[in-house]
Image (spheres, grey):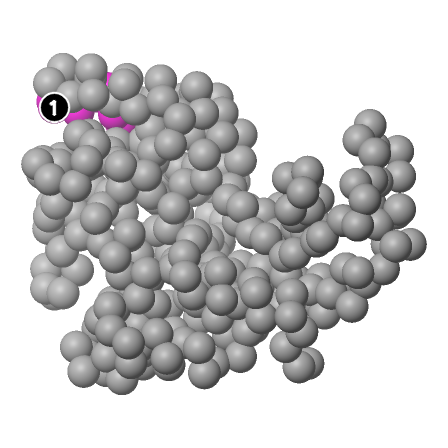
Amino acid sequence: MSESKTIRKLKNELIKTMPYFPNTKEVKEELEAQSWSSVLFHYLNWSARLIPTRKRKVAIKPYLTMDSRWSECEADVLRILTKASLGHDLTDHLSNSVLSKGYTSKENIQRHNDSWLDKDQILNTKGFYHLHLKSGKSNKGNIVLFVQVTRNELTAVALFDHSVFDSGSPVLSPERERMTRIYDDIISEDLAPGSVYMSHPITTSGHPIFLHSMAQQYIHVINQVDSRLNDSAFHSELYEGNEHPIPKKPKFCWHIEGLDLGVYESKTHHFFIYRYGHI
């Protein structure tokens, strides 16, 4: 499908929003030369590492309070959970690399011999986000909080030091082993003894399979709807049963907000969601 003005606008917005590294003109031009569907996939791969801002019910797993570090870290953890329950932005608690290492070329990955250069291995394979107890870009500390996140709930799972990210050695660090045990315990808690499970499957590239499915769904919606964005009959359909009147000469564009795909009306700031993100 050729790029319409609205699709080209979406592509340009995604490139503008998504960090890429090295942060050079050449890498930006490489992205611009790719198809809009490819740029969309790269954007979703990066954006899925963020935690969309919305109010969530919070919960705590016992692994957290049983940790010897709990008394020292309790206040910081509860502060994070309060932010989550109030719908505050948690981005400042994420690793700095999330905001600087979005897209990179295959050549750069091969040069560093690191297929996880633009991905979060633990998030993609275990589904755990990790939050630094201190916010900001500096002095985040060595202890991180692992959490599970859905659209409606954030569960604080356990505390780890940064050795939990060590995966290159044949011998796993004690923290990495503990994280794996906790994951296995959580994922199997509702299964009958002897059951086999496969959770968070990934492709050979390291991308979650659900991410490929999400991208394909978004591409399908855009292909089906894009040609109708300037159709008055389509505008009437969108506003049918809506308490807001149709604006004069509405102007719609594609927009992704917190992983949700929809069409955005620029005059009224109305956002009509077609597909909800997974969190």
* Above-or-below relation of 82 to 99: above
x, y (%) of residue 90?
A: 34, 33
- The residue positioned 53% from the left and 59% from the top of the image is 210
x, y (%) of residue 159?
A: 20, 32
For label 1, the SS is: loop
Other residues around mark 1 within 10 Å, as few (<14) / some (14–19) / many (≥20): few
- The image quadrant that residue 46 belongs to is bottom left
* Above-or-below relation of 226 to 279: below
Q: In the figure, is residue 197 to the left or right of 99?
A: right
Farthest front residue in view:
248
The one of 187 and 268 positioned closer to us in this rendering: 268
Residue 208, can we see it? no
What's the amino acid at mark 1?
Arg
Q: How many marks?
A: 1
Q: In the figure, is residue 68 to the left or right of 269?
A: left
Q: In the figure, is residue 275 to the left or right of 130?
A: right
* Above-or-below relation of 168 to 240: below
x, y (%) of residue 140?
A: 13, 36
Magenta residues (range) = 63-69
Question: Quadrant where the N terminus lies?
Answer: bottom right
* Magenta-drawn stretch contains 86: no
The one of 93 and 228 positioned closer to us in this rendering: 228
- The image quadrant that residue 81 belongs to is top left
Q: Which residue is mark 1?
A: 69
- The residue positioned 11% from the left and 40% from the top of the image is 138
- The residue positioned 15% from the left and 21% from the top of the image is 73
- The image quadrant that residue 200 belongs to is bottom left
x, y (%) of residue 7?
A: 62, 68
The one of 131 and 247 positioned closer to us in this rendering: 247
